[in-house]
Image (cartoon, rainbow, N blue to C red):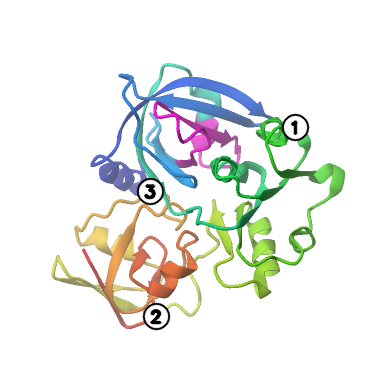
Amino acid sequence: MNTAVAAARAGLDTDATSIQVVGVEVVAEGVVAVTLADPTGRRLPPWTPGSHIDVILPNGLVRQYSLCGDRWDAYTYRIAVLRETAGSGGSEWIHTQLAEGQILGFGGPRNHFHLVPAERYLFIAGGIGITPLLPMIQQADRLKIPWKLLYGGRWRRSMAFADELTDARGHVDLVPENEFGRPDIADWVGDIEKGTRVYCCGPAGLLDAAERASANWLPHTLHTERFVNGAGRRADDRPFVVHLQRSGLDLPVAPGTSILDAMAQAGVGVLSSCRQGTCGTCEVAVLAGRPDHRDSMLSETDRDAGDCILVCVSRAHTSTLTLDA
């Protein structure tokens, strides 16, 4: 078991519990939907649109999956998993080994992709990025708020829940790439009206295109969620010191070392999972100093506030950063 998995499992022991697989269904080419329930039939923790859970597999891997079922169903969760043959094995295990009746560990739910109030919504999904948007669309429907969806995929048969969506109220544009090419996000959005919020989830290229299209939008109009964070080590990285207020420790953090690793080496445990700045598990409160945010989870409001940091990838603009740890 690698260090990341061990740390994640060790941390998740504090709030993880067991969940049982009660359904596995192929919903598109390379995508299975998994229905989960409490093994004893109890209610599951509540959640809100945009939430995800940590799923702890029997082989020790921990993966994050968006909840994409009915949030008002208190007894089951639904997730959907894309088979990634070039991945690190989590999706491959689920596609080849997972079966009804199996017991898995899980943590959460947590939400770093909140649906904020708006007068109208524009949703943009690419591939499996449709999953966190499904409950948002259901919420907009329930509140009778106008919405539109642009949903792109490699080809029609690979687009999960497409049939479910085309039956929904609102306007859905399905754009299989092999039929129509890649969608032009700026052209689809057009002149954005005041009170609109845009939610986008999918591959990095789609999110980059959405961010380019949003250059002239009002601040906080675009909300994104990335499955893979593009941030990594940079040539201008500088050493800094992290002061842990409650532990009374001063930890030097060298270029190439994460705050999370520096804390672990000093014996200060922090709950972590993805180690890519995409799941939000390792969020720690900032008491002083200015964070250099490199995650893809925090909102612009959170970043401007500067009062929290994801220690697996983010660093410091100041020579010292004081954390509540």
Residue 176 occupies quadrant: top right
- Judging depth in this view, the residue of 101 and 38 nearest the camera is 38
Quadrant occupied by the N terminus: top left
**How far from the left and from the top, in percent, is residue 183?**
78, 54
Q: Amino acid at mark 1?
A: Arg
Secondary structure at numbered mark 2? loop
Task: Name above or below for residue 266 compared with residue 218.
Answer: above
Q: Is there a contact, CB below 8 Å, between mark 3 and mark 1?
A: no
Q: Decide: few, some or many residues near mark 1? Use Cα within 10 Å; few <14, some 14-19, many ≥20.
A: some
**Label 2 or label 3, whichever comes before in sequence order:** 3
For disc 1, the marked residue is 157
Q: Which mark is residue 317?
A: 2
Q: Residue at x 36, y 52 (%)?
A: 281
* Most distant residue in the front direction: 144
The residue stretch that appears in magenta: 64-93
Q: Which mark is residue 273?
A: 3
Report whether 253 appears left or right of 201. Answer: left
